């Protein structure tokens, strides 16, 4: 009779608090209880804003005259690029259209360098309808285009609607209208450079004598397209138009079209607050605390200029949105609720939640990571892990990413990537779509040389123990915690892009014994946060594979601030140390006994000299054979 096989032994799970299971899952889960209070506060801030009352008089918007003006402008001046003869002709055309109304017209002329055009002359035109109050409502539309197409919809329709609204306010049609005086001063603004990043709107918001008295801005853009009515709410800073303004605009559009206007969803609004970006001209006003929004039939990105001819304009869309704009203007003129300034708000259906409450929720979601990271640091201290070599390794990575930022800045200052004003370049221009491959390759070559020097003391020279690897991960996680606090201090909404990374990478020390595939999968999961930004540019704004270059381009022109770039580079250093550990390539900074006699620069120079010396005998032999 054969002996029975020995019983199988179950693999024991590592003990909590050991080096094999260093992250306290109980403490991590318990810290999430702190999120309950911010969530409760956010729920109590949800409210349904009331729109302003309808104006006393019905709209007198003439859609057929407006569409005729739009087609005339697009046909006579199809190329209205800033600084061109078409741009000058379009400006004179607008003056002639406004002249019969008796409105004083003012011209603001300046010179500015635009990508692909050089230094050109731009003109903002304003027509002012005085009111009983110096408080100002601005109605605006950009007059230019990219020159790719005639720009009949984007934005000859907005310019034509601007003329029609100015006519209604300047020449009363009935005695009843003549008896009603505007409560506010109405400024009709025709900007230049709107298709080139909204430079005209940015100049007006920064330098106009009316800028300190503006209570609301209505931007008209692409009003006769095939798309549904839409409100654009994003700004150049994490601010939103006041709920009363948005609710009033939505109500007036609903009354005229029968359908509520679209706007970005909850995730889109969070992305726009975390990474403030817009291609419409309400952005510069919101950044300065001025209530503003855009009424359009376009999407997140203005419609393409190619094929934008007068024959494709929708009279029905122009009629309904024109009347909605006129009624919205009347509602704003009658009410004062829209003068509350700007704040951060998020729309959920027809209700709005306070931005500060959402910020509290995002900060609370960072707390469990911070608690677990600090506990991991305490465990490393209890086990007497050597953290100093890990800190020095992180310092070397920080220096390399700072070097990368310095190299990119040098190439930028030398003009290798092009230049332009600190505004989002139009995706339809060559500047936004043509990658400067030679400049990028040159920058990458310099970075490779820099990494060849930096990696000299970061590559493994011997087997790395589990304690050393855990020390490196602990230091990197603590560095990411500091990055998180810096994000909170600058823009808490940007935590949306950091939270997936920190909560996923926190478990890298826990899954390290499960093999490289599991570690790399967890690390890749953490990249979902930065991927949201690229995905938003690629999908929402239609940039596709050009999204990485466009993001770099926003840094090149200065639209993305230096503080944001510095925090991002610091986070990249911590992520690089965790990536090295996940790939099994992490090594602590070597001590004096482990370092080679030559430093990295001397070793690199020696390698180059030896290579040249070895090349010379080979060349001599070739010559002798020849």
Image (cartoon, helix red, strand yellow):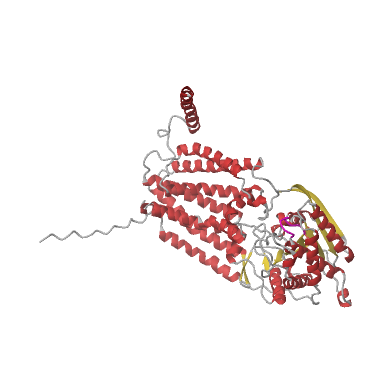
List x then y, in percent, for residue 420: 70, 48
Q: Can residue 521 be seen in this snapshot?
A: yes
Is 93 on the left or on the right of 490, as rendered?
A: right
What secondary structure predominates along the stretch shown in magenta?
Answer: loop
Q: Any magenta on residue 145?
A: yes
Is 5 on the left or on the right of 242, as rendered?
A: left
In the picture, residue 276 is in which quadrant? bottom right
Is 40 situated above or below 379? below
What's the residue at 56%, 40% (across, down)?
403
Is 389 situated above or below 331? above
Q: Nearer the viewer, residue 349 or 149?
A: 149
Q: Quadrant of the N terminus?
A: bottom left
List x then y, in percent, for residue 378: 43, 51
List x then y, in percent, for residue 34: 50, 63
Q: Can residue 137 be seen in this snapshot?
A: no
Is 68 on the left or on the right of 513, as rendered?
A: right
Region in magenta: 143-150
Q: Nearer the viewer, residue 304 or 228?
A: 304
Q: Which residue reaches farthest left?
A: 1
Q: Nearer the viewer, residue 209 or 24?
A: 209
Q: Nearer the viewer, residue 256 or 267?
A: 256
Q: Which residue reaches farthest front?
A: 626
């Amino acid at each position: 009779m054969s002996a029975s096989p020995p019983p199988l032994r179950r693999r024991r799970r590592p003990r909590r608090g050991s080096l094999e299971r260093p992250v306290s899952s109980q403490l991590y889960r318990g810290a999430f209880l702190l999120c309950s209070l911010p969530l409760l506060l956010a729920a109590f801030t949800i409210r349904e804003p009331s729109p302003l009352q309808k104006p006393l008089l019905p709209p007198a918007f003439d859609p057929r005259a407006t569409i005729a003006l739009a087609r005339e402008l697009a046909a006579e001046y199809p190329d209205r690029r800033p600084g061109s003869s078409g741009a000058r002709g379009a400006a004179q055309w607008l003056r002639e259209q406004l002249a019969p109304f008796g409105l004083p017209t003012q011209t603001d002329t300046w010179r500015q360098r635009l990508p692909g055009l050089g230094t050109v002359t731009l003109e903002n035109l304003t027509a002012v309808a005085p009111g009983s109050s110096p408080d100002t409502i601005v109605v605006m539309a950009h007059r230019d285009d990219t020159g790719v197409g005639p720009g009949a919809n984007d934005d000859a329709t907005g310019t034509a609607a601007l003329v029609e609204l100015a006519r209604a306010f300047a020449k009363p049609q009935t005695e009843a209208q003549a008896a009603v005086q505007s409560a506010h001063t109405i400024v009709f603004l025709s900007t230049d450079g709107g298709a080139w990043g909204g430079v005209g709107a940015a100049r007006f918001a920064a330098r106009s004598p009316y800028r300190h008295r503006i209570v609301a801005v209505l931007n008209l853009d692409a009003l006769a397209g095939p798309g549904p009515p839409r409100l654009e709410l994003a700004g150049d800073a994490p601010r939103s138009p006041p709920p009363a303004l948005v609710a009033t605009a939505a109500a007036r559009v609903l009354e005229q079209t029968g359908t509520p206007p679209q706007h970005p969803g909850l995730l889109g609004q969070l992305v726009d607050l975390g990474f403030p970006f817009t291609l419409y001209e309400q952005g510069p006003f919101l950044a300065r605390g001025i209530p503003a929004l855009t009424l359009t039939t376009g999407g997140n990105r203005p419609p393409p200029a190619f094929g934008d001819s007068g024959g494709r304009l929708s009279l029905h869309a122009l009629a309904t949105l024109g009347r909605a704009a006129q009624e919205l203007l009347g509602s704003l003129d009658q009410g004062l609720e829209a003068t509350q300034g700007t704040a951060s708000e998020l729309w959920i259906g027809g209700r709005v939640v306070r931005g500060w409450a959402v910020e509290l929720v995002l900060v609370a979601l960072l707390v469990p990571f911070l608690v677990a990271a600090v506990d991991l640091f305490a465990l490393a201290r209890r086990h007497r892990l050597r953290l100093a070599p890990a800190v020095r390794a992180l310092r070397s990575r920080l220096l390399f990413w700072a070097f990368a930022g310095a190299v990119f800045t040098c190439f930028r200052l030398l003009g290798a990537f092009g230049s332009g004003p600190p505004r989002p370049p139009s995706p339809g221009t060559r500047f936004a779509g043509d990658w400067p491959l030679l400049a990028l390759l040159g920058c990458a070559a310099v970075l490779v040389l820099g990494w060849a020097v930096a990696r000299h003391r970061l590559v493994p020279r011997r087997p790395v123990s589990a304690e050393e690897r855990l020390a490196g991960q602990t230091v990197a996680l603590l560095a990411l915690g500091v990055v998180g606090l810096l994000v909170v201090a600058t823009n808490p909404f940007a935590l949306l892009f950091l939270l997936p990374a920190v909560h996923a990478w926190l478990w890298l020390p826990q899954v390290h014994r499960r093999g490289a595939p599991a570690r790399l999968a967890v690390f890749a999961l953490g990249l979902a946060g930065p991927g949201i930004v690229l995905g938003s540019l690629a999908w929402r704004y239609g940039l596709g594979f050009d999204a990485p270059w466009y993001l770099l381009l926003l840094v090149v022109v200065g639209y993305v601030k230096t503080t944001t770039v510095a925090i991002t580079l610091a986070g990249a250093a911590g992520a690089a140390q965790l990536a090295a550990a996940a790939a099994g390539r992490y090594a602590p900074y070597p001590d004096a006994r482990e370092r080679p006699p030559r430093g990295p620069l001397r070793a690199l120079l020696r390698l180059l000299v030896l290579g040249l010396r070895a090349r010379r005998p080979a060349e001599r032999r070739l010559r002798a054979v020849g």
